[in-house]
């Protein structure tokens, strides 16, 4: 069984692994892994900024236990924010796979892929220090916030296991928390991992996943709705499907079970600040109320309707200061409601639509709309109104091209009237061919002229 990372570095945990990282344009076997960074970065504060996920993964393996701090830049970080990031995180050097990614007045070290057939591998850097893993938080529009994790905290929810026959795949980018979790699961399990590429068409990626025999596949509910809409989903046959990053409503869980009847399907709750909270594997949306206050490695409570977590998996601090925790508890900002013996996610604290003083979570309305068998996904938002402040607008993507749109519109609105208070029923509903996702794979809710 692979060793726990707290017994050493990530590199040490890979000892004996013959697993393969499979990028879109290159493949690297960990058994042949060579040194990928020539520069000596012992004790350095590093900003990891790459165009390619494969380079990022290999650099993380090499830098853990060598660099004192690794700040992992997501691919959509704005160049104008980099000077502030570098100053706040006391960066010494940028590590990247393209010299064009260098930042003025900051050192640069090139990360390269191992040379095929390099025998024996060149000596790697000798681990000498504890490494901070720093991630950007999601949802900020200005200079991004950064949180500090340890490798032990990041891997706290991962049970090392023999990975015979397992090949992971993910729609996430490994330079964000959700994708990093899957990278670490694959590495510690000595399992193969197929990496995504933002420039790759969905059908092409599904084909690549199928060719590599992916058994475990992860993504946001929005990722999975797009998979369900694609005829290329016939190319994959995962045995395990995992959703996280957004609310997994009953409609998407049921649709996945119909399309992939032999797969085990679960959804997980995690956030960049709070770490991995819990998994739900009973096929139902929400989570059992019994988790609240239950003993275990993660403590969970609800305060003022918001979910709070406390565990060793949480980030330890924000880079540059700011309150992350209160008495060890992280306020996730996710609102929940208890109905019977189960809690259901309502939406984000900051995502409320105000209609005449009445508060609405868009996700609640979307869950009702998505139950219609002709609907694949939807987005609800507020549009400014001089009388009520805002009205509720819904954009809907149909599961198939359907000429009976008027009938479907009537059926959706009738279902909303039956299941929702009148002020939550959309005042406008229109059909659209697709809905925009953020770079992290979540439904985009920040658009000009809209209240999200």
Image (cartoon, rainbow, N blue to C red):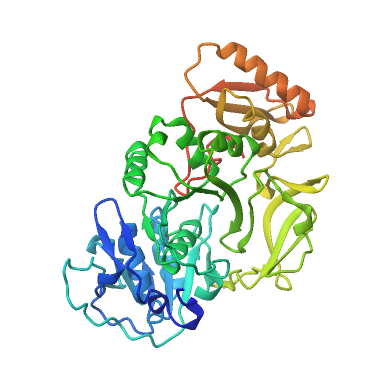
Q: Nearer the viewer, residue 108 or 63?
A: 63
Residue at 24 percent across and 61 percent down: it is 98
| Residue 344 relative to residue 74: left or right | right
| Residue 423 relative to residue 93: left or right | right
Residue 50 at least partly seen: no
Q: Nearer the viewer, residue 429 or 307?
A: 307
| Residue 160 relative to residue 61: left or right | right
- Residue 28 point in image, percent of width and height: 27, 63
Q: Nearer the viewer, residue 41 or 320?
A: 41
Residue at 50 percent across and 11 percent down: it is 403
For the C terminus, give its image quadrant. Answer: top right
- Residue 117 point in image, percent of width and height: 16, 69
- Residue 65 point in image, percent of width and height: 41, 81
Residue 214 versus residue 91 in the image, above or below: above
| Residue 279 relative to residue 167: left or right | right
Picture quadrant where residue 310 is located: bottom right
Residue 47 at least partly seen: yes
Residue sticking out furthest to the right: 340
Total number of numbered labels?
A: 0
Residue 81 versus residue 132 in the image, above or below: above
Residue 322 versus residue 352 in the image, above or below: below
- Residue 142 point in image, percent of width and height: 51, 55
């Amino acid at each position: 069984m692979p060793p726990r990372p707290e017994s050493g570095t990530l590199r040490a945990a890979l000892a004996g692994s013959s697993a393969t990282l499979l990028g879109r344009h290159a493949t690297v076997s960990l058994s042949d892994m060579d040194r990928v960074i020539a520069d000596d970065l012992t004790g350095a504060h590093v900003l990891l900024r790459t165009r390619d996920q494969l380079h990022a993964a290999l650099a993380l393996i090499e830098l853990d236990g060598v660099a004192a701090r690794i700040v992992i830049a997501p691919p959509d970080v704005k160049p104008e924010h980099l000077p502030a990031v570098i100053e706040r995180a006391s960066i010494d050097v940028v590590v990247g796979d393209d010299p064009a990614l260098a930042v003025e007045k900051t050192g640069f070290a090139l990360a390269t892929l191992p040379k095929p057939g390099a025998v024996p591998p060149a000596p790697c850097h000798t681990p000498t220090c504890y490494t901070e893993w720093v991630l950007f938080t999601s949802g900020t529009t200005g200079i991004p916030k950064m949180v500090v994790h340890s490798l032990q905290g990041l891997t706290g929810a991962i049970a090392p296991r023999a990975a015979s026959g397992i090949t992971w795949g993910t729609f996430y980018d490994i330079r964000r928390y959700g994708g990093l979790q899957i990278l670490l699961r694959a590495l510690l399990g000595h399992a193969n991992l197929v990496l995504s590429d933002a420039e790759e068409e969905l059908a092409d990626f599904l084909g690549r996943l199928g060719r590599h025999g992916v058994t475990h596949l992860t993504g946001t509910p929005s990722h999975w709705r797009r998979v369900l809409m694609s005829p290329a989903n016939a190319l994959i046959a995962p045995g395990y499907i995992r959703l996280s990053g957004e609310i997994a409503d009953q409609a998407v869980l049921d649709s996945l079970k119909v399309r992939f009847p032999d797969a085990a399907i679960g959804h997980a709750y995690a956030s960049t600040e709070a770490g991995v909270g819990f998994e739900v594997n009973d096929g139902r949306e929400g989570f059992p109320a019994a988790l609240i206050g239950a003993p275990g490695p993660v403590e969970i409570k609800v305060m003022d309707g918001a979910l709070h977590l406390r565990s060793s998996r949480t980030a330890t601090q924000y880079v540059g200061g700011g309150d992350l925790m209160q008495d060890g508890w992280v306020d996730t900002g996710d609102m929940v409601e208890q109905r019977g013996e189960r809690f259901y996610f309502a939406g984000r604290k900051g995502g409320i639509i105000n209609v005449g003083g009445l508060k609405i979570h868009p996700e609640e309305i979307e869950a009702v709309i998505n139950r219609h068998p002709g609907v694949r996904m939807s987005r609800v938002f507020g549009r400014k109104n001089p009388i009520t402040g805002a009205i509720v607008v819904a954009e809907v993507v149909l599961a198939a091209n359907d000429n009976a749109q008027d009938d479907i519109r009537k059926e959706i609105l009738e279902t909303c009237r039956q299941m929702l208070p009148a002020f939550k029923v959309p005042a406008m509903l229109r059909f659209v061919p697709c809905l925009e996702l953020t770079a992290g794979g979540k439904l985009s809710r920040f658009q000009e002229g809209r209240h999200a």
